[in-house]
Image (cartoon, rainbow, N blue to C red):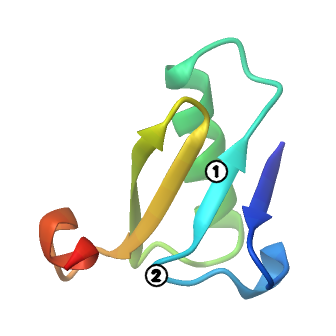
Amino acid sequence: MIASIGDSGIDKIKAGSVIMVSGTPGEVEAREEISKFLAEHQMQDLGYFAISDGYYILYHKTTNHQEALA
């Protein structure tokens, strides 16, 4: 399951949003779940990387993840 962290709902996620993935046995499955979610919601312009166990931050693929945090 994917959940949004913060004030906006999962349907309003964008670059800079933090999402939480639960109910997966490991990181590989969590990443598959995120990729599937982004594809289903036509958000393939977003990438993601882990910031903690089960937590990921989204960024625009047009920038690298170091620039996304700056």
Most foreground residue, 70 or 15: 70
Q: How many marks?
A: 2
Mark 1 or 2, nearer chain start: 2
Q: Residue 48 appears at what percent x and percent y?
A: 41, 57
Q: Residue 53 appears at what percent x and percent y?
A: 54, 29
- Which SS class for mark 1? helix
Q: Three-letter amino acid code at disc 2? A: Ala
| Residue at horizontal 56 percent and vertical 84 percent from the top | 14
Give the numbered dot on residue 15. 2
* Left or right: 38, with 70 as reference point: right
Q: Quadrant of the C terminus?
A: bottom left
Q: Quadrant of the N terminus?
A: top right
Residue hosting label 1? 36
| Residue at horizontal 42 percent and vertical 45 percent from the top | 51
Reply above or below: 38 against 15: above
Mark 1 Cα shell of 10 Å, populated few (<14), some (14-19), many (≥20) = few
- Which SS class for mark 2? loop
Q: Residue 60 appears at what percent x and percent y?
A: 33, 80
Q: Three-letter amino acid code at disc 1? A: Lys
